Amino acid sequence: MYNQSYDYPPETIISHSFFKAKPEEFWRFYKEKMLITDALPNKAHLKLAELEAAGKLTAVVTQNIDGLHQRAGSKRVYELHGSVLRNYCMECGAFYDGDYVKADEGILPICPKCGGMIKPDVVLYEEGLDNDVINGAVNAIRKADCLIIGGTSLVVYPAAGLIDYFSGKYLVVINKTTTSRDNFADLVINDPIGEVMDCIHV
């Protein structure tokens, strides 16, 4: 992303202030680099949904904004940073899915109902996380007997700090590289999460 033909660095473009000041530039980058609507769930997404369906998993807490957990079949998903699949008119609140926004011929998607500007339901830099989502995630982590942390380096806050609410029996970390919580875990597996989760028999 840092070697692209954009006049601004990615973390600047996907900030709230940039969205307000230069919405056309924001949407050009967002549509080209972030609005992926045809991705498919991997083995980890599918296994988590299978575990939930079997009554062995109560919730998924994710920083991802791709909606792949729901596409795999997971029902109780706390998306800390929102989803590219949800977009809302800033004036009337009308909902538009990711395919609608992606198919819009103009750079700047405009609500056909009221003419207002559409904003993706993702948490941009400078924006706070949704309180209801945070509370749901905290409650799920707090009540868990076993917490599996997977596919994250645990460097993005406040998401990484949610682990502090876990007081259950077993902490499992699955990540290709080491994390700051490895020393506290009961089990650490340094392999791709998709391969690891695919080995679990429900």
Image (spheres, rainbow, N blue to C red):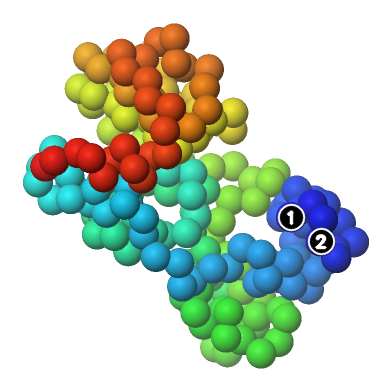
What amino acid is labelled 2 in the image? Answer: Gln
The answer to whether 169 is drawn above or below residue 22 in the figure is above
Apparent side of residue 104 relative to residue 45 in the rendered image (left or right): right
Q: Relative to the observer, which residue lies in front, 175 or 147? A: 175
- Residue at (32%, 23%) from the top-left corner? 172
How far is mark 2 from mark 1, CA to CA? 6 Å
- Residue at (34%, 43%) from the top-left corner? 195
Q: Relative to the observer, which residue lies in front, 57 or 91? A: 57
What amino acid is labelled 1 in the image? Answer: Met
Percent across and percent down for residue 28 are 74, 72
Location of residue 6 (image quadrant): bottom right
Check the picture and name the quadrant holding the N terminus: bottom right
Specify the farthest residue to the right. 7
Check the picture and name the quadrant holding the C terminus: top left
- Identify the residue under disc 1: 1
Apparent side of residue 189 relative to residue 28 in the rendered image (left or right): left
- Identify the residue under disc 2: 4
